[in-house]
Image: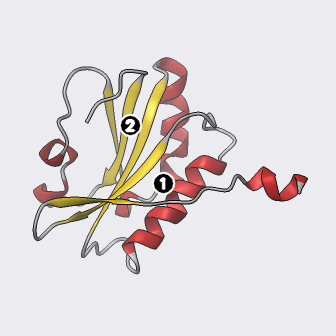
Amino acid sequence: MSTTSGTLVVISCSESDPRVDPARYFNLTGNTTQVIKTAGARTEGAINNIYHIDQSNKIGMIVVVQHSTCAWSPGDVEANIRSDIQTVRNSPYVRNEIPTIGYVLDVATGQLREVKTLFIPSHWFESH
C-alpha cells in the first residue's frame, strides 16, 4: 500500500504478536510510511502523533488496522474501527482532507477486510 500524495500513516495494535505487524500485511517501503502503535490500535492516543507527523511530512492517508481476537480492544472490531475513524476525522488537529480508512485483520487467515464507513462531520450537526 502506498500513497503518492504524502506520508502514509498506519495505526496498528501494539501487541507483540508478529501476526499484527503492519510490515507483514502491507508493502511498507521507503521513507513515506509512519506506523503508530497503540493499545488495540485505538486512535484517540494517536492524534498527537498524527498532528506532528503532518507538520513535518504532509500526510496523504491514514489507515487504521485493528485485528480479530484483540485483548486490548474488546467488542465489535468493525464498530471500533468506525468509531476510531470518526475520532480522527472530527479532531481539530487532523486536516479534514486526509483520507482515513480502516481494515480488520483476521489473525487466523492473515486476510485484511476493509471496513466501510459513512462519515458525517460533527460540524454538520451544528449548522443544520
Judged from this view, the residue extending furthest toward the right is 127
* Residue 27 pos. (x, y %): 17, 36
Query: Which mark, by number, is residue 43?
Result: 1
**Picture layout, residue 111 above or below residue 78:** above
Image height of 46 relative to 59, above or below: below
Residue drawn at (59%, 33%) of the image: 97
Q: Position of residue 88 (x, y in %)?
A: 56, 49
Name the spot of residue 79 as percent of width and height, x first. Answer: 47, 72
The residue tagged 2 is 9
Along the line of sight, the residue nearer the viewer: 30 or 126: 126
Q: Secondary structure at mark 1?
A: loop
Residue at screen point 55% across, 22% down: 55
Pointer 1 or 2: first along the chain: 2
Three-letter amino acid code of the residue under disc 1: Thr
Q: Quadrant of residue 72?
A: bottom left
Q: Secondary structure at mark 2?
A: strand
Which quadrant, please, contains the N terminus?
A: top left
Question: Could you tell me residue 117's position as x and y percent?
Answer: 50, 60
